[in-house]
Amino acid sequence: MKIKPGFELRKICGENIVISHGMENIFFTKIITFNESAAII
């Protein structure tokens, strides 16, 4: 599994969250969270 370009996995307040960055993802409104196992993969 690989995160699509324009997205980044960050740990925020103990949660693994995928965030978008850049103008091409400005309308991305969903929050994607991963547990510890999924974040490692």
Image (cartoon, rainbow, N blue to C red):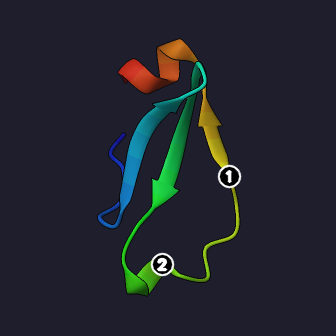
* Residue drawn at the location 61% of the way across and 73% of the way down: 28
Quarter holding residue 30: bottom right
Q: Is residue 18 above or below residue 16?
A: below
Percent x, y for residue 12? 54, 31
Q: Which quadrant is home to the C terminus?
A: top left
* SS type, badge 2: helix
Percent x, y for residue 25? 48, 78
Percent x, y for residue 5? 29, 64
Q: Which quadrant is home to the N terminus?
A: top left
* Residue drawn at the location 41% of the way across and 85% of the way down: 24
Q: Is residue 38 above or below residue 33?
A: above
Query: Which of these two is toward me, 24 or 13?
Result: 13
Position of 36 with respect to 5 (left or right) is right
Residue at the front extreme, as displayed: 13
Q: Which residue is mark 2?
A: 25
Quarter holding residue 16: top right
Q: Amino acid at mark 2?
A: Asn
Q: Amino acid at mark 1?
A: Ile
Mark 1, Cα crowd under 10 Å, few <14 / some 14-19 / many 20+, is few
Q: Which residue is mark 1?
A: 31
* 3D distance between C-alphas at marks 1 and 2: 13 Å
Mark 1 or mark 2, earlier in chain: 2
Residue at the top extreme, as displayed: 37
